[in-house]
Image (cartoon, rainbow, N blue to C red):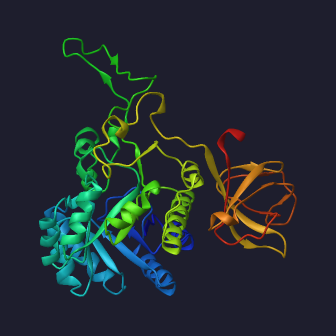
């Protein structure tokens, strides 16, 4: 399972919550420029962190490069060569050749941006020295199974996260409307905007587009979720499953990673898959646009779009804190992400679902160990947890409770 890492904290969270590998980007040349990303020195620290835990780090280099990018990519790779990253994820053939020239021993994975939809394409990339191809998101399980069975190239698929309106993310709407190139890592999410209808002879009259509610983002896709279909994914023979979300929070990374980890482990431990409703309930506690199964089970049709009153994100729970280290034998330190106060009912989320518990905050202290009533974002406070907690355990609460 490959989890997203938008920065070092998210990388550590992904590993702590069960990822086998993480994918991350440098400050340039990847498709998530709005994420914090990693400096060269941070990539070095990240490699050391994951390798000490027998995990892997993949670096995204997946923009569609123009001529003026190539020399900069060459310089970047010369610097990056001193760090033993486990693979580079590329989409552009030019970038691929640069990686092979500068770091000949590097493993290369092909991004989903390259739109690999058939066995011949997978074999083509394999002949270019590619070890793994992240298949296009528009494929069905049967097509994925056929490619995995008949190509020498290893395969990877996205199993959870945001879906793109355009073919595997190769969209030009953002560049046209906002001068922000999606294929250069700067998507403005134009497909999520609210639109009205204008008739050319009435330029100042805007006719609303309604499907069921007061707001319609007619091109906004639902999120992908395959938690109900673990056996089918395993039968398809893919080598790695990928979670989308380098721009999402630590809470998102932790929640999705631990649920898929438990589901996968449950299958392999028992040889039989017993889907549990609580898995989908947990995935409903992170921000999402409603879930469907993408193209895995056929064209999603109307179920693929999020319309009417449900348009936009649903966020029923807030990420309010992250445990870091104890102050004394009983008190535990918390980095505050959203405000909470004495008297609040909170949920503590562990690295495994059986470590979760609910409690009321009865006392709280600041850094000077003075009692306080409220905690605000950015503070570090201390509380008395009802059960043992570990570093990276998360505190959340229902959004409507404030």
Q: Position of residue 167 (x, y in %)?
A: 23, 49
239 to 228, vertically: above or below? below
Quadrant in which the C terminus appears? top right
Give residue 196's position: percent from left, percent from top.
33, 23
State left or right for residue 95 relative to residue 4. left
Which residue is more in the foreground, 368 or 172?
A: 172
Residue 207 image position (x, y, % from top left): 33, 16
Residue 26 seen from this side = no
- In this view, the residue in front, 267 or 278, is 267
Above or below for 90 versus 377: below
Where 106 sits versus 174, above or below? below
Quadrant of the image occupied by residue 148: bottom left
Residue at left 36%, top 74%?
58
Q: Nearer the viewer, residue 212 or 318?
A: 212
In the picture, which quadrant includes the N terminus?
bottom left
Q: Is residue 215 visible?
A: yes
Image point 30% across, 49% down: which residue? 295
Image side of residue 384 versus residue 48, left or right: right
In x, y percent, where is residue 153?
22, 75
Total marks in image: 0
What residue lies at 52% left-to-right and 47% top-to-bottom? 287
């Amino acid at each position: 399972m490959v989890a997203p890492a938008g920065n070092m904290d998210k990388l550590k969270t992904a590993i702590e919550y069960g990822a086998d590998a993480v994918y991350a980007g440098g400050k340039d040349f990847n498709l998530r420029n709005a994420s914090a990303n990693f400096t060269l020195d941070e990539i070095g620290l990240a490699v050391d962190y994951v390798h000490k835990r027998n995990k892997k780090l993949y670096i995204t280099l997946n923009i569609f490069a123009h001529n003026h990018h190539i020399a900069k990519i060459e310089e970047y790779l010369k610097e990056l060569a001193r760090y033993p990253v486990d693979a580079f994820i590329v989409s552009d053939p030019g970038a691929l050749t640069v990686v092979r020239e500068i770091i000949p021993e590097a493993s290369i994975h092909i991004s989903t941006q390259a739109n690999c939809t058939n066995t011949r394409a997978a074999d083509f990339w394999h002949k270019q020295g590619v070890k793994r191809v992240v298949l296009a998101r528009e494929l069905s399980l049967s097509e994925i199974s056929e490619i995995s069975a008949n190509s020498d190239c290893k395969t990877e698929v996205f199993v959870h996260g945001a879906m793109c309106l355009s073919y595997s993310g190769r969209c030009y709407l953002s560049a046209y409307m906002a001068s922000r190139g999606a294929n250069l890592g700067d998507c403005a999410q134009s497909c999520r905007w609210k639109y009205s209808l204008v008739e050319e002879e009435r330029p100042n009259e805007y006719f609303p587009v309604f499907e069921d509610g007061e707001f319609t983002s007619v091109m906004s896709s639902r999120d992908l979720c395959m938690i109900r279909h673990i056996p089918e994914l395993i039968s398809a023979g893919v080598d790695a499953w990928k979670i989308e979300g380098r721009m999402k929070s630590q809470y998102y990374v932790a929640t999705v990673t631990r649920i898929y980890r438990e589901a996968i482990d449950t299958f392999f431990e028992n040889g039989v898959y017993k889907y549990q409703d609580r898995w989908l309930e947990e995935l409903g506690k992170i921000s999402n646009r409603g879930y469907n199964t993408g193209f895995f089970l056929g064209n999603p049709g109307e179920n693929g779009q999020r319309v009417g009153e449900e348009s936009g994100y649903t966020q029923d729970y807030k990420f309010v804190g992250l445990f870091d280290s104890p102050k004394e034998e009983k008190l535990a330190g918390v980095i505050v992400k959203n405000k909470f106060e004495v008297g609040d009912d909170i949920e503590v989320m562990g690295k495994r679902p059986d470590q979760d518990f609910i409690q009321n905050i009865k006392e709280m202290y600041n850094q000077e160990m003075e009692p306080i009533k409220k905690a605000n974002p950015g503070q570090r406070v201390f509380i008395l947890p009802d059960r043992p907690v570990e570093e990276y355990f998360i505190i959340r609460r229902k959004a409507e409770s404030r």
